Image (cartoon, rainbow, N blue to C red):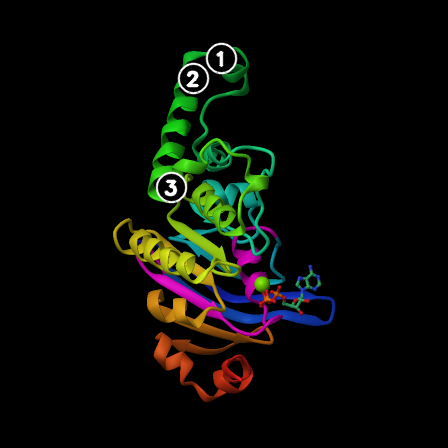
Amino acid sequence: MMKLRVAGLKQYFGGLKAVDTVSLDAKQSEILAIIGPNGAGKTTVINAITGLRKPTAGTVWLGDKTITGLAANRIAELGIARTFQNIELFEHASVLDNIQLGFYRHRKVTLCAELFNLPSARAEAVNARLAAEKILHYLDLVSWRDKAVSGLSYGIRKQVELGRALCSAPSFLILDEPASGLTREETLDLGYFLRDLAKNRGIGILMIEHDMGLVSRVADHVIAMNEGRILAKGSAPEVQSNADVIECYLGSEMV
Ligand SMILES: Nc1ncnc2c1ncn2[C@@H]1O[C@H](COP(=O)(O)OP(=O)(O)OP(=O)(O)O)[C@@H](O)[C@H]1O
Ligand SMILES: [Mg+2]
């Protein structure tokens, strides 16, 4: 089983220490949740892991390979897929086309083959389509298949974004607040998918989440962050009962 490891990660914006010496380990087949108040540095951590921003210091490993500071598309090619806090989709393209885009980390054909519609390009397009159709079924999105994303509900759009990430057949899936804006029922479904992806398909999941019900149901391990630092690590019950976590985060959420 491969690990995604982060050691001594720092991300400074001028004088602001948005992330200050964060280390974590995520494993395939496991779900690691990061919780913490607004501005704690959670998204900044995953932006550094996924190559959106080069960290000020620290190292990120995927297996035994150092991936720190590689370009985002290179990191995606290596098998780390992500979703965004504000959904990022091609709004005027269909659900199927958006999901299919995720496949292209496997792209092998040359531009020339594609331009001349050579057999290699056609075969790849068929594979991409098949992969996307499988994901449509898995996420129960078949009835939305040919609809433009722009007209769909928030919950469906979030599922399409998850589908695009899954279509790249990632080793690790990084999700930024996957349950935010979802109905209670959609959140329950999401929990079911996340457990299945980790436990039956071996994907490592690193998710930032504020919904403590979902975190308690699905996370194998929880990290609580505050002001760029890790406050507590452990199982969901351990972290939820940690006095510092209650004071900085959960206390205010519970009031
Ligand atoms: N590009 C940037 N330039 C300057 N400051 C930034 C930048 N990105 C994030 N920050 C700051 O870094 C801190 C951490 O932000 P981050 O988005 O990582 O928080 P978060 O834990 O994801 O919060 P939320 O729960 O609200 O999404 C915040 O103070 C934020 O304003
Ligand atoms: Mg965030």
What whole-number distance in Å separates the C-alpha atoms at marks 2 and 3? 20 Å
The reply to whether the C-beta atoms of the residues labelled 2 and 3 are less than 8 Å apart is no
Q: Is residue 18 above or below residue 139?
A: below
Element type at mark 3: loop
Along the polypeptide, which appears first: circle 2 or circle 1? 1
Q: Report x, y in % for residue 207.
A: 45, 61
Residue 88 position within the rendered picture, expressed as x and y whole percent measured from the top left: 58, 46
Helix, strand or loop at mark 2: helix
Q: Residue at x 50, y 34 (%)?
A: 101
Residue 175 part of the magenta segment: no
Which label's residue is closer to the chain start, 1 or 3?
A: 1
Rate crowding at label 3 as few (under 14), some (14 to 19) or many (20 or more) other CA atoms within 10 Å: some
Q: Which residues are magenta?
A: 27-52
As displayed, is residue 41 above or below residue 193?
below
The disc label shown at residue 169, or none: 3
Residue 211 position within the rendered picture, expressed as x and y whole percent measured from the top left: 46, 68
Camera sees residue 220: no
Residue 239 visible somewhere in the drawing: yes
Which label sits on residue 117?
A: 1
Q: Residue at x 60, y 39 (%)?
A: 91
- Pointer 2 residue: 122
In the image, is residue 114 above or below residue 24? Answer: above
Mark 2 vs 1: CB contact within 8 A: yes
Vertical side of 71 occupied by 9: above or below:
below
Q: Earlier in the sequence, mark 2 or mark 3?
A: 2
Q: Is residue 138 left or right of residue 180?
A: left
Return the residue nearer the eye: 52 or 58. Answer: 52
Q: Nearer the viewer, residue 237 or 204?
A: 237
Tag 2: residue type? Arg
Give the amino acid at mark 1: Asn
